[in-house]
Amino acid sequence: MDKLSDRVKRLGYSQTFVMSNKAREMKANGIDVISLTLGEPDFDVPDNIKQAAFDAINENYSHYSPVPGFLELRQAISEKLKRDNQLDYKPTQICVSNGAKQAIINVLAAIVNDGDEVILPTPYWVSYDEMVKMMGGNSVMLPTSYVTDFKITAEQLEEAINEKTKAILFSSPCNPSGGYYTYDELKSLAKVIAKYPHVTVISDEIYEYINYETKTASIAQFPEVYEQTAVINGMSKAFAMTGWRIGYSACPEWLAKACEKVQGQMTSGANTVAQRASIVALKTDPSEYKYMIDAFKERRDLMYDLIKEIPGFKVLLPKAAFYFFPDISYYIGKTLNGTEIKDADDFAMFILENAHVGCVGGVSFGSPECIRFSYAASEEELKEAMKRIKHLLETVS
């Protein structure tokens, strides 16, 4: 008898962690690998946030919190959403979770039945499709490309929605493309979604602050879809708090209560010390942490100049987040140094094994012709990584 459930057998492993683990193994064997795989800021947590955590320990915040989070934190999130996003959410509409990933899982678990469809514009974060599978749903991929700036149109969305559609799930700013939907683009999508009240929008805005141009908009700003939208955000990216595992959802009341019910049976409340520290982080003027975004922008500009020189790469200048997502379709179907390149995952492995630079193939992002580089690394590492890849491809092309 097979001991594993059909549900777990449907799931795949995160390609991000597959490649990062492979890079670690090579490093452990003495190979000089530069890993640009993980989406994690390489900064330390700001001192005022760390001090808030120390204070919370000394004040004995060591007991369970309410399932949806401390009221003070939900109030701070409510104030942040009003201050930065012009969104009105009461604390009762907010559920603090163990990272933004759990916030998304909570929403999907609350609304998706077996066989329901969830629309995923490509490219999407690697976990989205697996989360939908876990809930028994079916993902419907809406393709985009380098040519369309990796964004869908309102017409595409309208054609994809049917009676089985339960949700549309996307990130803006986007992991992995580094792009985002403009206010006008979101407005056109909102007009379509408003026609279908049975559809919930799950808007992942975790990279909101890591933005180099105009301030990003939220689809929840449009009144016609406010009651259909779950806003997802968290502390990991803008505050370099990835390991602290604090995320949150802001939803209409009916959905917020359902998320609380789901979380109450899975994990209960998030880490209490991290919650207390998050209050301080959110109440601090965002300009206090701008030094991290400024550093990312400098690295982006540096890497853009370098990556454009690599033969066969087509690349857009990312407007947000800390990723490049070049189209490498030039190499698909070729044989390089005896390695057949069938898709971007093959190409990523070829780069790792031959140039000793780790990246992530785009198959699990829904874009099998692209690869993702994180530039959350030092300028020296970025320079050396691009130098190695350029030299390799000039040699084998």
Image (tube, rainbow, N blue to C red):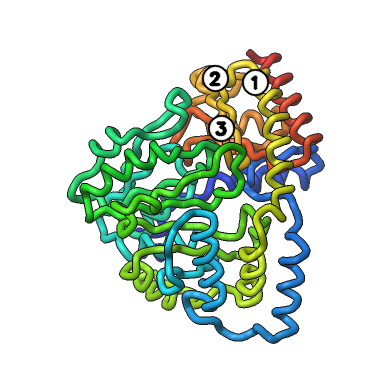
Dot 1 crowding, Cα within 10 Å, few <14, some 14–19, many 20+: some
The residue mark sitting in front, 2 or 3, is 3
Q: Is mark 2 in CB contact (under 8 Å) with mark 3?
A: no
For the point 31% across and 69% down, the residue is 254
User: Which image quarter holds the N terminus?
Assistant: bottom left
User: Identity of the amino acid at label 1?
Assistant: Lys
- Near-viewer residue (97 or 207): 207
Q: CA distance from mark 3 to mark 1?
A: 12 Å
Tag 2 or tag 1, which sits nearer the N-term?
Answer: 1
Q: Which mark is residue 331?
A: 2
Which residue is the site of mark 3?
325
User: Identity of the amino acid at label 2?
Assistant: Tyr
Tag 3 or tag 2, which sits nearer the N-term?
Answer: 3
Q: Position of residue 274 (x, y in %)?
A: 64, 71
Which residue is the site of mark 1?
308
Q: Position of residue 344 (x, y in %)?
A: 52, 30
